[in-house]
Image (tube, rainbow, N blue to C red):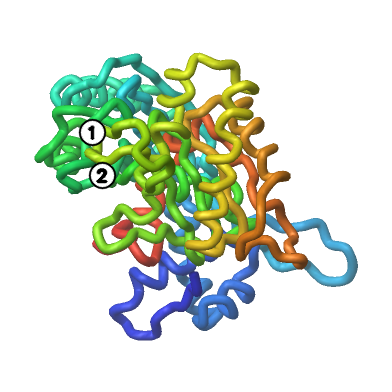
Amino acid sequence: MALRGANQESGKPFNRRIVLESIRLHGPTTRNEIARRVGLTVQTVSTIVRELEEQGLTLSVREEPKGRGIPPSKLTINPEGGHAVGIHLTPLSIEAALVNLRGDVVISRQRDTSDPKPDEAFAIISDMVAELKRSPLCGRLLGAGLALPGPFDVESMSFVGSTTMTGWKNVDIGERLAEATDLPVFFENDMAAAALGEQLYGLGQQFSDYYYMFFGVGLGGAMMNDGVVMAGAWGNAGEIGHIPAVPDGEPCPCGNRGCLERYLSLDAYRRRGLSEVAWVAEVAPMFRHAIRTVENLFDPQTVVLGGLAPQSLIEQLTTLATGLDNSVSARANRTSPRVIAARDCQHSALRGAAALAVYGVMSPRHGQMFET
């Protein structure tokens, strides 16, 4: 997205977030470069940088001189300037982690569960977060983010079936999460959270427009457009798990038959009982069809595969890209593969959940950090 500051007096909090976001995206960088990039004066940027350094959010580094004169100091995010709690809730487990501003998992906790109901889940979350707060590794906490299966607020699809959780309809997730963590809270479906985490901590320096295909118990995805998750009218854009794949195929809990995730997901993989190689070979035509559909719908720079699947399974699936047929992405001037693996599949949604909190307080579109 284009980062542009505001010159009005009322724009001060916004400008602080703009400068911080510019440092995060482009650091190490100089004050002059930031000013030119965001449209503010060097004096305004210098004042903001001084405040950020006082708050411990940024660091100044100076390179060794290579000739005459002293090179200007460069600014970068201080990874230990704050931490966020990332929480990932699935039908199989709950994981919580302390994540620094660079996206490193500092410490994590996991509890195996079986389709946890809200009271059980939030009690576990409360215990986990309290333990993370007591850790000597815990610094200033910015907030907590929760990633959980979607889609949200769709009567026939939300929190029904083996690929999601039962008993979660009409639960005020934000209120319950705030009570359990005593922190500013953010929540999102796991596929969008994982896509955001990849943007902040993974491939975001290489790509700004990509589709993140999330292999969880079910199958979902999210399109990153200019570095921002495409939400859709009700926040469920990119939900490919329920597109029709097999006419009159397997019944799906959503009420339809032959939905893609009945054949292409961790739930489908486990139900088939095949080896990774055998299963990948079996689903190859359907996988390639799904990739071509995504490409023709969204025209992404690349499709990133991630989620809860083992890294070995993700790598096996990426090899299927060599057999892809024609689509709008089959361009002679491509500089990247049509399908690539995410940087950290096993922690994608967890780091994405933490990114929700980091993005929530640092981003110029969503930030609240400097409002008071």
The disc at residue 124 is: none
- The residue at the point 29 percent across, 41 percent down is 150
Q: Residue furthest front?
A: 248
Q: Residues within 10 Å of mark 2 (few under 14, many from 20)?
A: many
**Figure check: 226 above or below 113:** below
Q: Position of residue 27 (x, y in %)?
A: 62, 59
Q: Residues within 10 Å of mark 1 (few under 14, many from 20)?
A: many
**Residue 354 in sight:** no
Residue type at tag 1: Thr
- For residue 92, which quarter of the picture? top left
Please state which of residues 235 and 194 is positioned toward the viewer in this rendering.
Answer: 235
Q: Position of residue 264 (x, y in %)?
A: 47, 34
Please state which of residues 236 and 350 is positioned toward the viewer in this rendering.
Answer: 236
Circle 2: element type: strand
Left or right, 187 with reference to 117: right
- For residue 14, which quarter of the picture? bottom left
- The residue at the point 71 percent across, 58 percent down is 62
Marks 1 and 2 in Cβ contact (< 8 Å): yes
Please state which of residues 40 and 91 is positioned toward the viewer in this rendering.
Answer: 91
Residue type at tag 2: Val
Circle 1: element type: helix
**Figure check: 153 above or below 90:** below
Please state which of residues 65 and 197 is positioned toward the viewer in this rendering.
Answer: 197
Q: Which residue is mark 2?
A: 185
Q: Position of residue 97 (x, y in %)?
A: 41, 29
Q: Which residue is mark 1?
A: 181
Q: Which image quarter is the C terminus in?
A: bottom left
3D distance between C-alphas at marks 1 and 2? 8 Å
**Figure check: 328 above or below 43:** above
- The residue at the point 32 percent across, 30 percent down is 163
**Residue 226 in sight:** yes
